[in-house]
Image (cartoon, grey):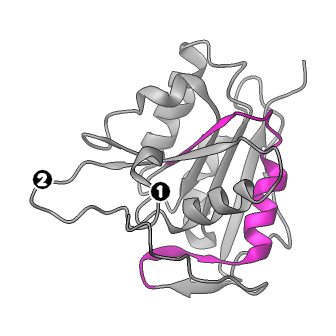
Amino acid sequence: MDPSKSLPPLSDEPRRFPDLCLSLSRTLICSITDLLDLPDGSLVLSVGSGSGLLEAHLQAHWASKPGCTREIRGIEIRTAPSARPVNKWLPENLSSTVRGTWELSPELSSAGALLFVYPREPSLVDRYLLAAAKNGNGHALRTVIWLGPQADWETFEGCFRDVAGFAPLQIAQNCGTAEYEMLAVIQRLSA
């Protein structure tokens, strides 16, 4: 990411950007922040972060809050050394790669939240949730958010139903998504 590159401004209405599938708005950034009821210093993993524009806006929003030490890390598939990096917006220290959709980020064990934005494979979501449960990450992982087109939700809904230790699935309303997009969330049950 070029440090001199400033983030494109957001409005209250969702807007498309050329290097991001998801429409962005200030309302969406605030909605995601509100849903991430995490202690300071928590790590949020964004699986399939692409250009990193959403993640960079979230990190900038959190950095503007006094005392907020939350951090987001974009996870993307490693490209060939000669290829341009997919990430354009997140600083390098907030971006990691994996070898393919079969590999999970080793940072999962310390993540307080997972963010899936326009994921392609339900099996990837399932693998992250199963690995978090197996690795005893049950206490660290508190929130899982899915953002994508309503048309894809039927394919992914099963990943989020009846997840052990989590409250029932919620579909967020008036959260700043475009009319054809949606936000689904599961949150850990209180002990």
Q: Whole-percent x and y of residue 161?
A: 70, 40
Comparing 156 with 16, the one in front is 16
Three-letter amino acid code at disc 2?
Pro
Decide: few, some or many residues near mark 2? Use Cα within 10 Å; few <14, some 14-19, many ≥20.
Answer: few
Comparing 105 with 121, the one in front is 105
Comparing 44 with 100, the one in front is 44
Q: Which residue is mark 2?
A: 81
Residue 56, image quadrant: bottom right
Decide: few, some or many residues near mark 1? Use Cα within 10 Å; few <14, some 14-19, many ≥20.
Answer: some
Task: Please say whether residue 176 is visible from this viewpoint.
Answer: no
Residue 37: in magenta span: yes
> Residue, x 73% and y 18% (percent of image)?
139
CA distance separating discs 2 and 1 = 24 Å
Ranked by sequence position, the earlier of labels 2 and 1 is 2
Q: Name the secondary structure under disc 2.
A: loop
Q: Which residue is mark 1?
A: 119
Q: Whole-percent x and y of residue 14?
A: 69, 84
Three-letter amino acid code at disc 1?
Pro
Residues in magenta? 18-46
Q: Name the secondary structure under disc 1.
A: loop
Left or right placement of residue 1 versus residue 185 in this view: left
> Residue, x 83% and y 51% (percent of image)?
66
Q: Whole-percent x and y of residue 108?
A: 52, 29
Left or right placement of residue 33 versus residue 92 in this view: right
For the C terminus, the quadrant is top right
For the N terminus, the quadrant is bottom left
- In this view, 24 is above or below 11: above
Residue 68, image quadrant: top right
- In this view, 191 is above or below 158: above
